[in-house]
Image: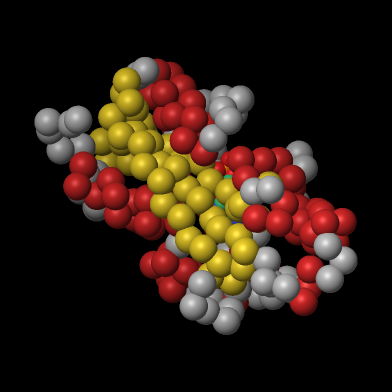
């Protein structure tokens, strides 16, 4: 556990969208650093869970930059697909991270499982594991999640990734139809952040 408040922090991601979202969630008194400032490439994510992959990233980047590092790993679990794409969420989008491909694959896999899937409630959830490490030492690792269902068709233009096909519980719109500021308040990443706030 940290005895002192954090004053500087490396954000362990090469994804510019994620960097922005994470920076916005951090208290303004923390000086943030990006992996590009240290010209760091991302490590291979060989973990078997969101937590393991998050820790692989925060340890790797911390050791390279010699600085406390926060990293996340996130993805979409779909119950009918035995929790796939899960930790493979980014990989379903191919090397060019084309999420039209990933969404097409989700619908194809659902059809293979049940040709009447569109008439049913397809339960799903977004998960985010956030971790902070200093070199190989884990300071904290937490999980945030949001339950919901898969939309029959992709809807909305906001957000990224699987946002057009995910309808959070107690809502009628997909994440991509919501204002980003509204989505951030309820999503998996902000829930995980709430759990680490006391360390920041
Ligand atoms: P990561 O960079 O390995 O954590 O990959 C996470 C992947 O999960 C992203 O590339 C997205 O495909 C998906 N994902 C995670 N969070 C969200 C979200 O809030 N909306 C849409 N897709 C998400």
Q: Residue 35: percent from the left, percent from the top?
A: 46, 33
Would you place residue 34 above or below residue 157 in this image?
above
Tell me the quarter of the image containing the C terminus: top left
Point 87% across, 66% down: residue: 115
**Residue 197's spot in the image, x, y percent?**
24, 49
Q: How many numbered marks are there?
A: 0
**Residue at horizontal 19%, vertical 30%?**
1
Most foreground residue, 32 or 2 = 2
Task: From the viewer's side, name the closer residue of 71 and 85.
Answer: 85
Residue 194, placed above or below residue 45: below
Side of 99 relative to 83 (left or right): right
Task: Tell me residue 112's x, y (percent).
Answer: 87, 56
Q: How is the image coloured?
A: secondary structure
Q: Nearer the viewer, residue 161 or 111?
A: 111
163 lies above or below 30: below
- Considering only vertical position in the picture, is 22 above or below 162? above
Give the residue drawn at x 65%, y 75%.
156
Q: Residue at x 53, y 70 (%)?
A: 168
Q: Left or right? Give the position of 87 relative to 12.
A: right
Q: Residue furthest bottom?
A: 172
Side of 155 where 41 appears, left or right: left
**Residue 104 visible to an observer of this rendering:** no
- Residue 99 sits in which quadrant? bottom right
Q: Residue furthest left?
A: 3
Percent from the top left, x then y, of residue 23?
37, 50
The answer to whether residue 154 is visible is yes
């Amino acid at each position: 556990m940290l005895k002192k408040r954090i004053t500087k922090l490396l954000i362990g991601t090469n994804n510019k969208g994620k960097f922005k979202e994470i920076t916005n969630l951090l208290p303004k008194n923390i000086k943030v650093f990006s992996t590009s400032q240290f010209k760091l490439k991302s490590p291979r994510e060989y973990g078997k869970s969101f937590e393991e992959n998050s820790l692989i990233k925060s340890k790797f980047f911390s050791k390279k930059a010699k600085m406390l590092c926060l990293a996340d790993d996130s993805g979409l679990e779909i119950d009918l697909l035995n929790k796939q794409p899960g930790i493979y969420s980014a990989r379903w989008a191919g090397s060019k991270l084309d999420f039209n491909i990933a969404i097409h694959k989700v619908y194809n896999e659902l059809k293979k499982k049940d040709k009447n899937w569109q008439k049913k409630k397809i339960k799903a959830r977004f998960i985010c594991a956030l971790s902070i490490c200093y070199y190989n030492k884990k300071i904290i690792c937490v999980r945030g999640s949001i339950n919901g269902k898969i939309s029959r068709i992709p809807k909305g233009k906001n957000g990224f990734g699987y946002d057009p096909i995910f309808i959070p519980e107690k809502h009628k719109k997909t994440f991509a139809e919501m204002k980003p500021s509204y989505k951030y308040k309820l999503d998996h990443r902000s829930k995980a952040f709430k759990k680490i706030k006391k360390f920041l």
